[in-house]
Image (tube, rainbow, N blue to C red):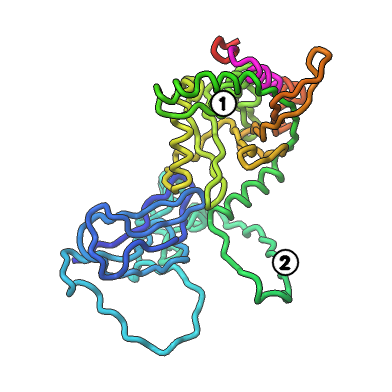
């Protein structure tokens, strides 16, 4: 008896993924919980593991194909006998290749099976019987349009998508490499453009004298690492400073919901992490309740798992404010783009020694430019500038962070 390998639930609002790569080949023996295939969504890469031990009998969907929740990816034959494996196809003459399409179970599925989360919610809310609705989706699956039509709501014409302009003949095509964008990169592009199209984004700048922070780190870094098993970095100081400023200026921690402003009395801080696949923003929950050591440990752990593609969907959603550090790549100054529906993002940059005036004298100090990009629909100029000054004061006098003043 064969066990089907099925696309699992991908998280709220995510109904489709791309098969990134198979980790096993047909004929390979697999144990329970062995990773079989990697799926790439627009937020994370996740592995589908074997629910039964046996032999990988069949791969129905090849790498590069798009699949929906519930689609059958392949099957596992019980036991380890070679006879259980589907026989290999005989070599055939090369054929013209066609674009890979997602394959799903060959037999039609019931209307109640494998509904996307959005469709299931609509069905549950409307109390409609899905068995009485004809599905027009892939393999007869129900779509939101099918359910709305059954409820008497006419289907509206879909918004016309403007196709990308053709690039035309490319004179150096033989010296170029064309690579399909990953789902994550496509999603990053969509969200950044949506943010610019929707929010009224402005950026205000300031500069911070990092002398005291650097002296504090130099004095306590060895003892801190020995006691807590993690290095004392800049990020925990800036997260602490941001939380303190958010408490003083709650509009920066708010969001727009329809015609309402939602002020959040909790501080889930997103920390931007660059990965080989693109930029992701894992979230440190209740950052206001965490110590410097807790923040450093969690930020280090989230960063490592982000680069390894091991973050869960929950760890990438629900942030109230974001901190990003372009300085690790040498950026001297930049204007970060907010992460909707958040209203603000704090940008850190490179620490560079510069001559500055202190009490009438020119001295050399390690300075950092900081930036706050904010949604002007929610946050006024006075609040944004005051917020950034609050962060600057806390970093230049880190005792403020300990005393909460």
Work out whether 12 lies above or below 92: above
Mark 2 crowdedness (10 Å alpha carbons): few <14, some 14-19, many ≥20: few
Question: Could you say where residue 352 lies in the image, as x and y percent from the top left?
Answer: 70, 32
Query: Which residue is tagged 2?
Result: 165
Question: Could you say where residue 323 lies in the image, as x and y percent from the top left?
Answer: 60, 33
Quarter of the image that includes the N terminus: bottom left
Residue drawn at (61%, 10%) of the image: 405
Q: Main secondary structure of the magenta part?
A: helix
Residue drawn at (18%, 64%) of the image: 78
Work out whether 63 lies above or below 249: below
Residue 66 visible to the viewer: yes
Magenta stretch in the rendered image: 387-399
Quadrant assignment, res 201: top right
Whether the magenta-drawn stretch holds residue 393 is answered as: yes
Mark 1 crowdedness (10 Å alpha carbons): few <14, some 14-19, many ≥20: many
Question: Could you say where residue 348 lies in the image, as x and y percent from the top left?
Answer: 65, 33
Kindly identify which numbered label has been placed on residue 19. Answer: none
80 with respect to 350 (left or right)? left
């Amino acid at each position: 008896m064969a066990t089907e390998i099925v696309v699992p639930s991908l998280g709220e609002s995510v109904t489709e993924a791309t098969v990134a790569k198979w980790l096993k080949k047909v004929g390979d023996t697999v144990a329970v919980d062995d990773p079989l295939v990697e799926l790439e969504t627009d937020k994370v890469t996740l592995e589908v593991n074997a629910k039964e031990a046996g032999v990988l009998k069949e791969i129905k969907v090849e790498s590069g194909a798009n699949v929906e929740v519930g689609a059958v990816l392949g099957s596992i034959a019980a036991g380890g006998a070679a006879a259980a494996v589907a026989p290999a196809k005989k070599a055939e003459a090369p054929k013209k290749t066609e674009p890979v399409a997602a394959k799903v179970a060959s037999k039609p599925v019931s209307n109640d099976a494998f509904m996307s989360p959005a469709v299931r919610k609509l069905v549950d809310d409307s109390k409609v019987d899905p068995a009485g609705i004809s599905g027009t989706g892939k393999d007869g699956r129900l779509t939101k349009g099918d359910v709305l039509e059954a409820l008497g709501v006419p289907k509206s014409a879909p918004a016309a998508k403007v196709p990308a302009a053709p690039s035309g003949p490319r004179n150096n095509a033989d010296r170029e490499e064309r690579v399909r964008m990953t789902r994550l990169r496509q999603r990053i592009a969509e969200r950044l453009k949506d943010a610019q199209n929707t929010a009224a984004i402005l950026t205000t700048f300031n500069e911070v004298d990092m002398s005291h922070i650097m002296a504090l780190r130099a004095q306590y870094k060895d003892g801190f690492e020995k006691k807590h098993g993690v290095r004392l970095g800049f990020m925990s100081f800036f997260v602490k400073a941001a939380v303190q400023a958010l408490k003083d200026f709650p509009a920066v921690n708010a969001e727009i919901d329809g015609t309402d402003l939602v002020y959040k009395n909790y501080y889930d801080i997103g920390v931007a992490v660059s990965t080989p696949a693109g930029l992701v923003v894992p979230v440190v929950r209740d950052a206001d309740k965490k110590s410097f050591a807790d923040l450093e440990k969690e930020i280090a752990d989230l960063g490592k798992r982000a680069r390894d593609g091991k973050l869960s969907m929950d760890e990438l959603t629900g942030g109230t404010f974001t901190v990003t550090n372009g300085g690790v790549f040498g950026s001297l100054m930049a204007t970060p783009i907010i992460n909707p529906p958040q209203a603000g993002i704090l940008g850190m940059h490179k620490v560079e020694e510069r001559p500055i005036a202190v009490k009438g004298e020119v001295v050399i100090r390690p300075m950092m430019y900081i930036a706050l990009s904010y949604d002007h629909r929610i946050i006024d100029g006075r609040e944004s500038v005051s917020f950034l000054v609050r962060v600057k004061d806390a970093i230049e006098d880190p005792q403020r962070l300990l005393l909460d003043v």
